[in-house]
């Protein structure tokens, strides 16, 4: 690839393409495979983000005055993009976002290579937005989008950037470089002609080398051959494909000639594992085992040395070296290395995300056909992946377009726009940390008539009102007159408020007499009534006429029964005649009504008396009497008013029994049926804590007992019941107490007999195989004598552990035992012993089970506790005896405790006098077992005796001493020797852990006089006081002669020179690779790695190594955008050198 413009040359500005209408280059059009994989920028960031489903669709308007054009630019040059936005249409300042690809916003990378600028022209109300891309690279090529958003208005435009390789023909000066620091002034440095000539010579050598090389195997790097030597034969094909080796047969032939020599590691006894895995937030330990414990160990992360801290903890345990990483996060996912001298052990750490837990589960849902259904669940992490399932089958967008999945932060919503009966079932949501489920029931819509239309008889010029009430307040409808739709007018009005539909006809006329019908939209249902027009005929009436009430009558008295729904208005008009005009009185029993205003009132008109009750109540029910009188006579009529209402709710709703997924609920009939017979009941249930009730039946249920099914075991539920009559549904429902569908457990497992005595039997068992959501409250143990069918409970209270001793059994009897588990759902099936047990003591020979650590001398330090637990066995209970060297123990110094199966010897603070042999005896009748425990209590030793300086010669001194008189009751493990100058008397260590009672002290300073002191040491530590030498060691001064060197040192300084160049490579995406070369130079040159002439700095993807002149660049899991030109440059005081190679990353097909 040609070199980009050097820093000394003036930077070029990208210009728009000359022909915008021309086709873009093929490089700017990614193939379908390239569109499918995520793009990455130069920094390795993905350029295609997830399309957020929550983004609302804004209103598209034309806001751009000037849009960016397609741009073609050479690598290394800057790109300038400019847009102009019209702000006269906007009320607030617009926001501009630049995107690469579909959803990668460039604003997140502001300040690195992307710079943004905006200006505002106040007079013209125009906003100018600019984007500058510094030093373009080939990865910048592709499609871009600019988006302007302001409240509900937005506009967007797209454009393409093509990046081409820089051409050298434009300016010959670009081929030269200055030796200065690259500033723009003329004194930046001289042009380096020798570097240009050297480069041409190197290029010619490379071309000649390629022509002369006949063996393609020479192009394979040495590190690949080393990898093939130690790899298994089954991995040859994978390695060849990873490193681009096409001649597999030739590679195998050459590999066969090479001897495989597996070198055993000199530093590591056990290396790191190939990889480690840990959950986010947890800690991980990596450990190696050394061959030499005195070597220095270093730990590296991605090539950077790790220092001890609270996060990284280093431990030394014997030959093991442990690295502990606390509270791992995603940044700890990297390559780690342990270095000992020149040997390395490498591994890789993978940090896993924590499991996604369901915070708010799904709730049962009930809907009608055609309605929109939303099932919602809340998880613990934002952006988590969840799987929706229906009846065990996964739901996907590809299967059908009826399901829509929505994410809102931690909430995930499944939307069914128009539900059908096929959508009913059990829906599940699964994450990697849990699952939940809920039921969806879909039913056909059913419209119930809560109040029908009543026939009306209306006089002329009065008002006629038809009213009906249905169960759905969203239902609309139309009114018909003799089958013809009624149009609203000044006299005729139609209203719809909630569930009530009204037709009002003012100023009734004779032509209004007809059949009126209300037809709900979408339902095969009609409600009809008739309007009767009452004509008033005026006949000649004599002056004297007795009063008369004009009502229908049967028999001698006027008796009429009127039925009114509670809450409705009752108006009863009674026609009256008589001359002179009669007086009217209304009575209920003996109580007379005289109010002309209020809820219950009387309205008087000519030849008419009206009795009005506003909002009828249950107390208004009864017999009402109207009495009319005048001087000629009297007349009266009796009216019976019956108030009907919705019934009271059922009483005493209770759960009688539950199962694994069902429950039986019963209730009592309501005390008041509302004046109409109870037609049935409606049952609903919900999960405890939820606000959504789900109907169990859509048609009324006539019985007072119901079984609710399809429930989830272990979930708390509540059930409520409504009563229904001809008027409607009861206003409120009584709710049952919360209950849980559970089932008894299975029977306990592996019931066995553990021990038997003359009156007791000890049983043990294992928990049931199936426990369920109800858990286990405890176990019930029962026994039965042989020949009897009566089972007797052995325990009054439930036993929680899986073992029990049945006491008070008759000796010699054969008894059967059984065990049952009990929980809130009841008792389980019984676990019964296969054979009866005979109640009789079994004699067992005594035996002491001495622990392994007590079979040898038991050592304790002075002041420590001695606590020995020694188990034994034997039946009946044996007699335990402790002695020390044949004498009984002093209870003031030694405490002894004895149980049925073990004994404890306890000394609170050990002393030297407690040392000795302790005998333990376990005896049953004439059978006995004994054991001896040897206890030694040790202390620090005394100081050595008679420390003297035995001999002095040159700069050395021989020191000798006698072992201490008191060795602390244990052997002396060594001595510590210190020295001090007589002038300062500051003591310094000379030897530690010296085994012999003598030592030679070397490297003493001439002219000084020394004292020596010695500490003795055993397993308890150093002696409290040292012994100081009685005499001193005097180092005499002697003459010194300097001999100058008789030779001249060789000058090894040299400029950097590459011995092995970089080789062009072709690798497979996703497989780690390495670039290798070798350099020589002194002083040690500084090494710089560059990609496309840009220096590679602290990037975790690249790991740079320098070992004895061999340079390696490891690239972890390269992607196609990691391909390009790589340069390795070595610099020291005497000069510099560089090598270049090309890396191509292929995607496997």
Image (spheres, rainbow, N blue to C red):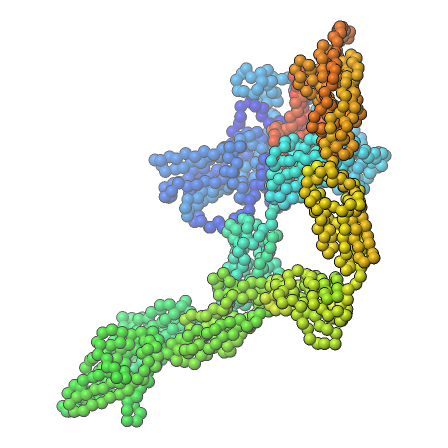
Residue 842 located left or right of residue 381: right
Q: Nearer the viewer, residue 55 or 333?
A: 333
Question: For the point 77% across and 21% down, which residue is it?
Answer: 946
Q: Nearer the viewer, residue 1005 or 766?
A: 1005
Identify whether 309 is placed above or below 238.
above
**Quadrant location, the N terminus:** top right
Residue 407 located left or right of residue 1018: left
Residue 513 located left or right of residue 297: left
Question: For the point 70% across and 67% down, which residue is it?
Answer: 808
Q: Position of residue 541 (x, y in %)?
A: 16, 90
Q: Quadrant of residue 1012?
A: top right
Q: Residue furthest left?
A: 543
Mark yes or no: residue 312 visible: yes
**Quadrant location, the C terminus:** top right
Identify whether 662 is placed above or below 54.
below
Residue 1121 located left or right of residue 756: left
Mark yes or no: residue 532 visible: no
Question: For the point 52% across and 51% down, which residue is it?
Answer: 410
Q: Position of residue 259 (x, y in %)?
A: 85, 34
Q: Position of residue 662 (x, y in %)?
A: 58, 69
Question: For the point 74% across and 52% down, which residue is it?
Answer: 902
- Numbered marks: total: 0
Q: Nearer the viewer, residue 394 or 308?
A: 308
Identify whether 1072 is placed above or below 1077.
below
Q: Position of residue 236 (x, y in %)?
A: 78, 41
């Amino acid at each position: 690839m040609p070199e980009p413009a050097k820093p000394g040359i003036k930077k070029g500005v990208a210009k728009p393409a000359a022909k915008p209408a021309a086709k873009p280059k093929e490089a700017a059009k990614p193939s379908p495979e390239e569109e499918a994989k995520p793009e990455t920028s130069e920094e390795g960031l993905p350029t295609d983000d997830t399309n957020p489903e929550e983004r609302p669709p804004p209103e598209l308007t034309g806001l751009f005055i000037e849009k960016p054009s397609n741009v073609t630019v050479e690598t290394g040059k800057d790109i300038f993009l400019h847009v102009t936005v019209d702000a006269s249409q906007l009320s607030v300042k617009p926001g501009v976002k630049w995107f690469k690809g579909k959803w990668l916003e460039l604003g997140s990378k502001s300040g690195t290579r992307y710079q943004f600028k905006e200006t505002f022209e106040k007079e013209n109300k125009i906003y100018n937005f600019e984007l500058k891309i510094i030093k373009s690279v080939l990865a910048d090529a592709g499609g871009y989008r600019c988006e302007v958003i302001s409240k509900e208005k937005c506009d967007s435009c797209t454009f393409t950037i093509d990046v081409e390789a820089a051409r050298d023909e434009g300016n010959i000066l670009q081929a030269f470089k200055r030796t200065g620091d690259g500033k723009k002034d003329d004194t930046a440095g001289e042009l380096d002609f020798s570097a240009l000539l050297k480069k041409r010579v190197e290029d010619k050598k490379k071309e000649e080398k390629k022509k002369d090389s006949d063996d393609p195997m020479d192009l394979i790097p040495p590190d690949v051959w080393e990898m093939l030597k130690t790899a298994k034969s089954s991995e040859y094909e994978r390695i060849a494909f990873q490193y681009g080796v096409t001649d597999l047969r030739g590679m195998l032939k050459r590999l066969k000639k090479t001897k495989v020599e597996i070198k055993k590691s000199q530093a590591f006894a056990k290396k790191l594992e190939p990889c480690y895995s840990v959950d986010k937030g947890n800690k991980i330990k990596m450990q190696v085992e050394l061959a030499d414990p005195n070597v220095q160990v270093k730990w590296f992360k991605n090539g950077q040395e790790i220092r001890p801290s609270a996060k990284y903890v280093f431990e030394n345990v014997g030959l093991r070296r442990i690295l502990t990483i606390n509270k791992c996060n995603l940044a700890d996912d990297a390559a780690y290395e342990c270095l000992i001298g020149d040997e390395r052990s490498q591994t890789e750490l993978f940090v896993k995300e924590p499991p996604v837990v369901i915070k708010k589960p799904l709730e049962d849902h009930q809907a009608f056909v055609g309605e929109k259904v939303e099932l919602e669940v809340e998880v613990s992490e934002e952006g988590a992946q969840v799987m929706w399932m229906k009846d065990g089958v996964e739901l996907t967008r590809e299967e059908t377009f009826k399901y829509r999945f929505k994410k809102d932060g931690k909430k995930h919503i499944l939307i069914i726009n128009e539900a059908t009966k096929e959508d009913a079932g059990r829906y599940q949501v699964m994450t990697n940390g849990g699952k939940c489920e809920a039921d969806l029931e879909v039913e056909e819509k059913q419209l119930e008539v809560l109040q029908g239309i009543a026939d009306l008889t209306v006089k002329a010029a009065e008002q006629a009102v038809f009213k009906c009430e249905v169960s759905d307040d969203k239902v609309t409808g139309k009114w018909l007159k003799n089958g013809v739709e009624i149009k609203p007018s000044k006299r005729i009005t139609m209203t719809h408020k909630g569930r009530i539909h009204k037709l009002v006809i003012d100023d009734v006329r004779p032509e209004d007499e007809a059949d009126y019908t209300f037809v709900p939209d979408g339902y095969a249902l009609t409600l009809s009534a008739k309007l009767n027009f009452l004509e008033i005929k005026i006949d000649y009436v004599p002056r004297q006429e007795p009063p008369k009430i004009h009502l229908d009558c049967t028999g001698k008295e006027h008796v009429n029964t009127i039925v009114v729904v509670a809450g409705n208005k009752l108006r009863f008009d009674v026609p009256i005649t008589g001359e002179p005009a009669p007086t009217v009185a209304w009575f209920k029993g003996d109580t007379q009504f005289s109010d002309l205003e209020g809820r219950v009132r009387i309205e008087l008109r000519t030849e008419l008396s009206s009795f009005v009750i506003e909002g009828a109540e249950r107390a208004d029910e009864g017999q009402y009497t109207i009495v009319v009188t005048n001087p000629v006579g009297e007349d009266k009529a009796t009216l019976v008013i019956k108030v009907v209402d919705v019934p009271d709710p059922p009483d005493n709703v209770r759960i009688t029994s539950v199962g694994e997924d069902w429950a039986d609920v019963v209730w009592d009939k309501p005390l008041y049926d509302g004046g109409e017979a109870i037609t049935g009941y409606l049952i609903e249930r919900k999960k405890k804590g939820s606000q959504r009730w789900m109907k169990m039946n859509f048609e009324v249920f006539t019985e007072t007992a119901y079984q609710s099914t399809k429930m989830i075991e272990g979930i708390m539920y509540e059930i409520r019941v409504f009563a229904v009559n001809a008027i409607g549904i009861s206003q409120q429902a009584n709710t049952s107490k919360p209950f849980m569908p559970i089932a008894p457990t299975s029977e306990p497992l592996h019931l066995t007999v553990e021990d038997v005595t003359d009156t007791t039997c000890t049983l043990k068992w294992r928990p049931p195989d199936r426990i369920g959501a109800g858990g286990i409250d405890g176990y019930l143990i029962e026994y039965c004598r042989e020949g009897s069918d009566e089972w007797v409970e052995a325990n009054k209270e439930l036993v929680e552990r899986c073992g029990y001793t049945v006491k008070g059994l008759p000796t010699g009897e054969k008894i059967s035992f059984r065990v049952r588990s009990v929980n809130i759902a009841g008792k389980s099936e019984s676990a019964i012993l296969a054979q009866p047990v005979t109640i009789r003591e079994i004699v067992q020979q005594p035996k002491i089970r001495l622990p392994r650590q007590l079979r040898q001398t038991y050592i304790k330090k002075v002041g420590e506790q001695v606590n020995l637990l020694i188990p034994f066995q034997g039946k009946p209970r044996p007699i335990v005896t402790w002695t020390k060297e044949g004498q009984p123990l002093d209870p003031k110094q030694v405490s002894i405790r004895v149980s049925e199966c073990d004994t404890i010897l306890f000394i609170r603070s050990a002393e030297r006098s407690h040392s000795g042999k302790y005998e333990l005896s376990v005896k049953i009748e004439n059978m006995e077992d004994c054991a001896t425990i040897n206890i030694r209590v040790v202390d620090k030793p005394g100081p050595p005796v008679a420390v003297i300086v035995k001999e002095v010669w040159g700069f050395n001194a021989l020191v000798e001493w006698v072992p201490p008189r008191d060795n602390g009751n244990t052997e002396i493990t060594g001595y510590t020797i210190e020295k001090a100058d007589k002038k300062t008397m500051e003591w310094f260590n000379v030897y530690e852990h010296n085994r012999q009672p003598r030592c030679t002290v070397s490297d003493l300073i001439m002219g000084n006089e020394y004292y020596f002191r010695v500490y003795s040491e055993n397993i308890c530590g150093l002696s409290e006081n040292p012994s100081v030498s009685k005499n001193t060691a005097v180092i005499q001064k002697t003459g010194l002669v300097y001999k100058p060197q008789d030779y001249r040192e060789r000058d090894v300084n040299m400029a950097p020179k590459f011995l092995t160049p970089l080789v062009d490579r072709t690798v497979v995406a996703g497989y780690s690779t390495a670039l290798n070369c070798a350099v020589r130079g002194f002083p040690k040159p500084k090494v710089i790695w560059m990609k496309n002439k840009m220096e590679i700095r602290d990037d975790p993807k690249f790991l740079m190594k320098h070992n004895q002149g061999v340079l390696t660049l490891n690239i972890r899991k390269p992607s196609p955008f990691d391909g390009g030109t790589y340069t390795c440059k070595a610099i020291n005081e005497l000069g510099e050198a560089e090598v270049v190679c090309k890396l191509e990353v292929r995607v496997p097909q």
